[in-house]
Image (cartoon, rainbow, N blue to C red):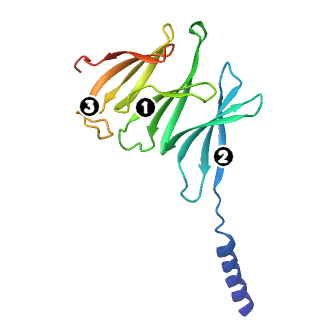
């Protein structure tokens, strides 16, 4: 009887001492080939048992020489990346739509223009503009971006905010038009 109790206590102590191993695994998920370049896009994520940084980092990996460049979007940000390649207009770039990871509320989102090697990043919209969606016109190389101007600066989309449409030229890398007066719903 004493042997079995001793064995159970010993097993319990060992499981407490060695069973709480911290298993945080940093992994890079290879997401997509960046067409027309030597680069592959990767994304960092954690397989975690304890709370660690939630920074969203994209990796641009050169498939020829193995060099890697990272772009950090910050904490608790989700990123959706889309490649835009229009050979006739000599456009090959990436668009990153960012939004906070809290999906319970309608929160601000933004658009960034990234070079295909990840070394250049340019914010397309102002800080007070929340991107709802966008469409590319492949004939002109312009993005038509629908969103809301956060006029009360509360970081959320609400009834006080102004709905607007921006037109952004990917060829010239600048905003070319703003439509503020949208038809009534």
Query: Separation of disc 1 and disc 3 at Cα?
Result: 16 Å
Residue labelled with disc 3: 161
Query: Separation of disc 3 and disc 2 at Cα?
Result: 39 Å
Q: Quadrant of the N terminus?
A: bottom right
Identify the residue at horizontal 43%, vertical 31% (top origin). 110
**1 or 3: tag closer to the N-terminus:** 1
Element class at badge 1:
strand
**How many numbered tags mark residues here?**
3
Residue 133 to residue 16: above or below: above
Element class at badge 2:
strand
Left or right position of 77 against 91: left
Identify the residue at horizontal 66%, vertical 21% (top origin). 35
Q: Residue 132 carries which label?
A: none
Identify the residue at horizontal 51%, vertical 11% (top origin). 138
Residue labelled with disc 2: 27
Q: Point out residue 75 in the picture as x, y percentages from the top left corner.
A: 49, 46
């Amino acid at each position: 009887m004493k042997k079995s109790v001793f064995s159970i206590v010993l097993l319990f102590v060992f499981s407490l001492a060695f069973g709480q191993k911290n298993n945080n695994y940093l992994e890079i998920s290879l997401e997509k080939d960046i067409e027309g370049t030597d680069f592959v896009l990767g994304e960092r994520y954690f397989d975690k048992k304890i709370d660690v940084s939630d920074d969203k980092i994209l990796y641009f990996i050169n498939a020829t020489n193995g060099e890697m460049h990272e772009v950090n979007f910050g904490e608790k940000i989700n990123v959706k990346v889309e490649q835009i390649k229009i050979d006739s207009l000599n456009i090959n770039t990436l668009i990153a739509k960012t939004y906070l990871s809290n999906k319970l509320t309608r929160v601000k989102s933004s658009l960034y223009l990234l070079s295909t090697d990840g070394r250049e990043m340019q914010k397309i919209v102002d800080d007070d503009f929340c991107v709802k969606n966008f469409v590319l016109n492949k004939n002109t190389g312009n993005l038509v971006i629908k969103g809301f101007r956060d006029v009360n600066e509360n970081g959320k989309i609400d009834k006080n905010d102004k709905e607007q449409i921006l037109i952004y030229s990917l060829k010239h890398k600048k905003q070319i038009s703003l439509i503020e007066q949208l038809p009534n719903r």
